[in-house]
């Protein structure tokens, strides 16, 4: 299996084409129609120009970050590899273009890829979903064991991002992402994430609509409504979005950003929208005081507003207690990842022309609210 070329679509409009070069970097070129009527799908790397773009390196397997964002992360990639083997295909034999072709129209965000490659799997009825059974099946997959639910897990979770097992289900006629514990997690990690999101909302941070789905084995599974898909009078509208990792072509698997970078990026993308700048500042404070140190470059997303031609921050996500492997924030605060202080927080504000007195008040407010709501979870 080797896909030589893929066309990229947005709302059934041809954005451009992807072609693999001899050195396995993936070149991209906008279509003439998109040049005349579209927008830059990645403002830093792919300006709206008629030329062939080639990545400078292999951070995302030879892809530009915007296209890598369409691919699943650790959990989804694991499921895809299992399904490839089930279909008699060696995962090592397929390219990143092949993986995009397999994702086709099923990725997160608005971009779709054609021609698509279809893997064989059995169809299931959504009404038969048993979340406890799926959670158990996820554990079996993580332990490299076989499961009768692999087809279901792949169909409803094979395109998802993030490291933790998850599936997409339909609830109240909307699509929701439901997370399950990994084999290393506290079995009540879903309840903890729910409490974190409730606290973040209490702290004035924009979070996606969320809830706990019932379980007989734990306090519940955390679910959040997909913010890349929204109902409209004309049907379901898919929204184009980019992670900070994709925009900056930055490897999210390593500590590569500071909140100074994120605030500056937010200011540029939102055209100096003060509300957006305050949102990312509040999120930084929350992550510091709530001990959420898994704040890597792929945990910050921007959604394109095609009416205003600006990028606004998505609802915050992946908010929970985390120490990371190194015990430090993946995104540093004024250069400090291990033990950021109030002085570091205020320094970030000062460096970004945020009123320092107001910044101090926001930090104190969030510190108090986090201590009130989350003290029992922070070790």
Image (cartoon, grey):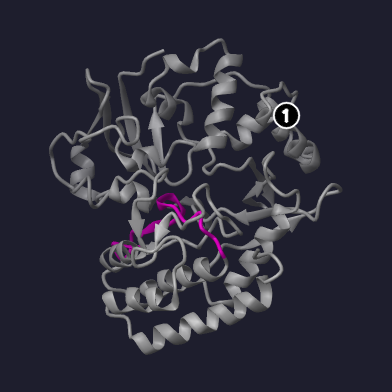
Q: Position of residue 203 (x, y in %)?
A: 56, 77
Q: Is residue 152 above or below residue 129?
A: above
The quadrant holding residue 213 is bottom right
Q: Helix, strand, or loop for circle 1?
A: helix
Indicate whether residue 306 is drawn in magenta.
Answer: yes
Q: Is residue 373 above or below residue 339?
A: below
Indicate whether residue 296 is drawn in magenta.
Answer: yes
Q: Which residue is mark 1?
A: 140
The stretch of residues the image draws in magenta is: 291-311
Q: Is residue 346 left or right of residue 317?
A: left
- The quadrant of the rendering that contains the N terminus is top left
Q: Nearer the viewer, residue 137 or 209?
A: 137
- The quadrant of the rendering that contains the C terminus is bottom right
* Residue positioned 53% across, 84% down in the render: 365
* Residue positioned 77% across, 39% down in the render: 129
Q: Is residue 29 left or right of residue 72?
A: left
Q: Residues within 10 Å of mark 1 (few under 14, many from 20)?
A: some
């Amino acid at each position: 299996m080797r896909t030589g070329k893929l066309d990229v679509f947005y709302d059934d409009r041809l954005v451009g084409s992807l072609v693999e070069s001899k050195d396995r970097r993936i070149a991209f070129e906008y279509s003439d129609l998109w040049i005349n009527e579209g927008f830059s799908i990645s403002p830093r790397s792919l300006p709206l120009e008629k030329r062939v773009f080639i990545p400078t390196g292999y951070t995302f397997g030879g892809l530009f970050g915007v296209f890598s964002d369409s691919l699943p992360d650790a959990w989804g990639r694991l499921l895809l590899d299992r399904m490839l083997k089930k279909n008699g295909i060696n995962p090592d034999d397929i390219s990143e273009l092949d993986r995009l072709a397999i994702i086709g129209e099923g990725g997160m965000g608005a971009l779709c890829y054609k021609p698509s490659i279809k893997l064989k799997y059995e169809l299931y009825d959504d009404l038969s979903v048993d979340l406890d059974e799926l959670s158990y099946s996820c554990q079996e997959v993580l332990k490299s064991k076989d499961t009768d639910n692999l087809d279901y897990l792949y169909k409803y979770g094979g395109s998802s991002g993030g490291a933790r097992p998850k599936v997409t289900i339909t609830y109240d006629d909307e699509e929701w992402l439901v997370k399950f514990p990994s084999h290393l997690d506290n079995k009540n990690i879903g309840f903890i994430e729910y409490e974190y999101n409730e606290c973040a909302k209490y702290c004035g941070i924009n979070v996606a609509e969320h809830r706990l789905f019932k379980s007989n084995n734990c306090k519940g599974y955390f679910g959040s409504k997909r913010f890349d898909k929204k109902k409209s009078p004309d049907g379901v509208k898919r929204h184009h979005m980019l992670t900070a990792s994709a925009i900056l072509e930055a490897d999210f698997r390593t500590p590569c950003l500071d909140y100074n970078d994120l605030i500056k990026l937010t200011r540029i993308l939102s055209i100096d929208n003060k509300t957006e700048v305050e949102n990312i500042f509040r999120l930084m404070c929350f992550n510091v005081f709530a001990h959420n140190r898994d704040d890597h470059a792929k945990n910050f997303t921007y959604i394109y507003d095609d009416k205003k031609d600006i990028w606004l921050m998505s609802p915050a996500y992946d908010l929970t207690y985390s120490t990371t492997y190194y015990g430090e924030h993946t995104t540093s605060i004024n250069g400090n990842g291990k033990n950021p202080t109030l002085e570091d927080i205020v320094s970030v504000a000062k460096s970004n022309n945020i009123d320092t007195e107001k910044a101090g008040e926001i930090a104190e407010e969030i510190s108090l609210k986090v201590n009130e709501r989350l003290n029992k979870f922070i070790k």
